[in-house]
Image (spheres, rainbow, N blue to C red):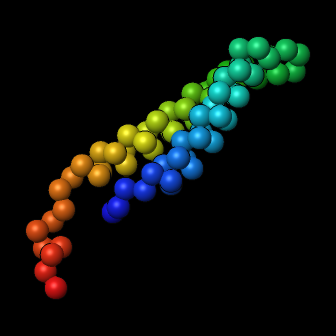
Amino acid sequence: MADNRVARGIVLVPCLLLGGAFLATAVWGQGVAAENRPLAAALGLGLLLAGVLAQWRVSEASETPPDANDDAP
């Protein structure tokens, strides 16, 4: 499978932005948002972790050598 930097960026950027927004809500939330701090923190951390794992998993897969049978017609 080819390494596609554009696809990795499409996954990473929204995960980081949304994860940061949920974490900010967990830290600075007031009123009704304060009641949902554990949920916002869990969603924020989950999104950040998903974005980082998507980058790491694809990078790891691109380092594997291709099979010797791929060159055969």
Locate residue 69: give its quadrant: bottom left
Q: Determine the image quadrant of residue 28.
A: top right
Answer left or right for 50 relative to 67: right
Q: Residue at x 65, y 27 (%)?
A: 20
Q: Residue furthest right?
A: 31
User: Looking at the image, is 65 positioned above or below residue 56?
Assistant: below
User: Residue 32, position in %: x, y?
Assistant: 87, 21
Residue 68 visible? The answer is: yes
In the picture shown, does residue 8 fall above or below 2? above
Residue 61 placed where, x, y %?
A: 30, 51
Residue depicted at x 80% and y 17%:
29
Instruction: Count the marks.
Output: 0
Towards the viewer: 34 or 20: 20
Residue 23: x %, y % from top left: 66, 23
Residue 39 location (% of width, % of height): 68, 27
In the picture shown, does residue 40 fall above or below 60? above
Name the quarter where the N terminus is drawn: bottom left
Residue at far bottom of view: 73
Q: Left or right? Give the position of 68 relative to 3.
A: left
Q: Is residue 35 left or right of residue 52?
A: right
**Would residue 39 be seen by someone viewing this image from the given angle?**
no
Q: Quadrant of the C terminus?
A: bottom left
Determine whether 56 is above or below 1 in the image. Answer: above
On screen, residue 3 versus residue 30, left or right, reads left
